[in-house]
Image: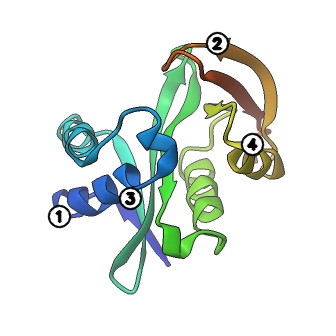
Amino acid sequence: MKIRQLRETDIDEVARIMSSTELWQRYGVDFKSARKRFERGLKEKAHIFVAEIEGEIAGFLWYVPRGAFDRSGYIELIGVKDTYRGRGIGRALMEFVEKEFNPDDIFLLVSDFNKEAQKFYEKLGFVKIGEIKDYVVKGITEFIYHKKRSKR
């Protein structure tokens, strides 16, 4: 597996991964809106990475170094293609960001109904520290997760 920066030629595939995921469909994301989001991110030089296996995009991660409280790292988006779930792609992307940016703190939001993601982040050392009701979509609570890291 190779992890690298998102390229313009990757946008359709990461938009497909995002828009075909039930989670984001609940937030009203479709292929067109996902594509626009990644195009904007690429244009703004966002830290968007893809995991590539034998030339195929297996997943992506969008990281904002000072995205939480203008101080701490923030995982804006992470997604793994259905056919690659459970194979360590998400973990590899998260570990890559931690190694590459070495933040003291990382935050992320997880939907209340996304139990699988909650377990995944907890295994990686994240702790649920709060919640925001109706933050993105009415009727969905976002759980705030935090990971305090010691610099190596």
Categorize mark 2 by other alpha carbons within 10 Å: few (<14), some (14-19), many (20+).
some
Instruction: Please say which color scheme the image uses.
Output: rainbow
How far apart marks 2 and 1 lie (CA) works out to 37 Å
Q: Residue at x 65, y 61 (%)?
A: 91
Q: What residue did someone put label 3 on?
A: 17
Dot 4 or dot 2: first in sequence order is: 4
Q: Position of residue 48 (x, y in %)?
A: 37, 48
Of the residues shown, which amino acid type is indicated by label 3? Answer: Ile
- Secondary structure of the residue carrying tag 2 is strand
Q: What residue did someone put label 2 on?
A: 133
How far apart marks 4 and 2 lie (CA) works out to 16 Å
Q: Is residue 150 left or right of residue 30?
A: right
Q: Residue at x 63, y 32 (%)?
A: 111
Q: Residue at x 49, y 19 (%)?
A: 136
On screen, residue 55 above or below 147: below
How far apart marks 1 and 3 lie (CA) works out to 14 Å
